[in-house]
Image: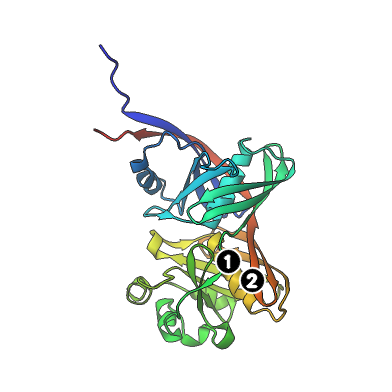
């Protein structure tokens, strides 16, 4: 008599906090370092079960010139690219010894947006920093709703939102965000998304997810930001690398120098008690952005095994 067919598979996963050097800060992430036996139909359900901003499923590369293939899921859909999952995935693979480290190591992750180069700094199983280079340079989207509409949606006054050369703009480096500059840190802290207004003004817009930010006038190069992502099933994200990349394109385009290297520190997540620090670097030549890099640290937090039901015939 034949043995009964297995009803489930077991898959090991790890959680990390990304864009922080301390556990319980940054943005939580789940990584399944070997997803080859996980049924395709289960991927979205697993991401919903994890209920984190993103979950990463790792596979062997389709081309040997790349290091791994990474698929990124929010609780409600698959993403072509995201920053903290890319940085966290590279960090996890290095910490598990799957990527040998010796000072600086360069890898390439295959993602929906295309190949994403990642630099990892550290020694054997001790990564200290990971930095991605965007696969797509900043793309400008269509004009956003007016300041009065955005202010109402964000529970702010119209004068809280900057105008002129510093007016809101939609930008994508693989995933679109509406960048909304605010006049000061107090306005950033006061921002709250009104879902009824978001449904009517941004839900169907090219960039429905919103990053608000203000410069810290006491610390040069420091930006305080918040990212609202109601379309991803999570109202506020504590650390958003893809939004930081878009912000880099926005800021560098407004730098007076036509050529140069510009660095910024983006602080995010403080208002929801998940302090995060994203290092942002942008290259510009003859008025055009030529490269955007997003980096930070991460902390391994937990290890577990998930029992995943197999689909029934």
The quadrant in which the N terminus is found is top left
Mark 1, residue position: 137
Q: Residue at x 35, y 71 (%)?
A: 204
Give the x, y percent position of residue 272: 51, 62
**Looking at the image, residue 135 lies above or below residue 46:** below
Whether residue 27 is visible: no
**Looking at the image, residue 307 lies above or below residue 18:** above
- Find numbered disc 1 in the image and state the secondary structure of the residue it sits on: loop
Q: Earlier in the sequence, mark 2 or mark 1?
A: 1
Residue lying at the far top of the rendered structure: 1
Marker count (numbered)? 2
Q: Are marks 2 and 1 in contact (CB under 8 Å)?
A: yes
Whether residue 145 is visible: yes
Whole-angstrom CA distance, mark 2 to mark 1, is 7 Å
**Looking at the image, residue 119 lies above or below residue 253:** above
Q: Residue at x 63, y 77 (%)?
A: 253
Q: 238 or 83: which is nearer to us?
A: 83
Mark 2, residue position: 289
Give the x, y percent position of residue 80: 46, 56
Left or right: 183 with respect to 309? right
Answer few, some or many: residues within 10 Å of disc 1's Cα (few below 14, many 20 plus, some between 14 and 19): some
Give the x, y percent position of residue 213: 56, 73
Q: Residue at x 46, y 54 (%)?
A: 53
Residue lying at the far right of the rendered structure: 103
The quadrant in which the C terminus is found is top left
Q: 210 or 235: which is nearer to us?
A: 210
Give the x, y percent position of residue 16: 55, 46
Left or right: 57 with respect to 102? left
- Find numbered disc 2 in the image and state the secondary structure of the residue it sits on: strand
Residue 261's quadrant in the figure? bottom right
């Amino acid at each position: 008599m034949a043995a009964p067919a297995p009803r489930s598979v077991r898959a090991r996963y790890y959680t990390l906090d990304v864009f922080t050097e301390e556990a319980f800060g940054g943005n939580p992430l789940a990584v399944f370092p070997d997803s080859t036996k996980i049924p395709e139909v289960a991927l979205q359900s697993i991401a919903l079960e994890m209920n984190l901003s993103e979950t990463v499923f790792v596979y062997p590369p389709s081309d040997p010139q790349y290091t791994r293939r990474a698929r990124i899921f929010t609780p409600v859909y698959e993403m072509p690219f995201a920053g903290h999952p890319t940085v966290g995935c590279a960090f996890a693979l290095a910490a598990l010894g799957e990527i040998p480290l010796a000072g600086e190591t360069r890898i390439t992750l295959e993602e929906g947006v295309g190949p994403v180069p990642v630099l990892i700094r550290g020694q054997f199983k001790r990564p200290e920093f990971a930095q991605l280079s965007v696969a797509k340079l900043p793309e400008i989207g269509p004009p956003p709703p007016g300041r009065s509409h955005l202010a109402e949606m964000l529970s702010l006054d119209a004068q809280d939102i900057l105008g002129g050369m510093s007016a809101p703009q939609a930008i994508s480096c693989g995933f679109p965000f509406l960048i909304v500059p605010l006049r000061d840190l107090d306005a950033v802290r006061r921002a709250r998304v009104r879902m009824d207004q978001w449904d009517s003004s941004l839900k169907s817009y090219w960039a429905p997810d919103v990053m608000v930010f203000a410069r810290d006038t006491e610390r040069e190069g420091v930006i305080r930001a918040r990212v609202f992502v109601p379309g991803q099933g999570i109202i506020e994200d504590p650390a958003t690398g893809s939004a930081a990349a878009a912000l880099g394109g926005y800021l560098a385009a407004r730098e007076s120098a036509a050529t140069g290297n510009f660095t910024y520190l983006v602080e995010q997540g403080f208002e929801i008690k998940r302090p995060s620090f994203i290092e942002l670097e942008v290259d510009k030549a003859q008025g055009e952005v030529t490269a955007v890099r997003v980096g930070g640290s991460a902390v391994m937090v937990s290890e577990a095994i998930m029992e995943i039901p197999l689909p029934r015939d």
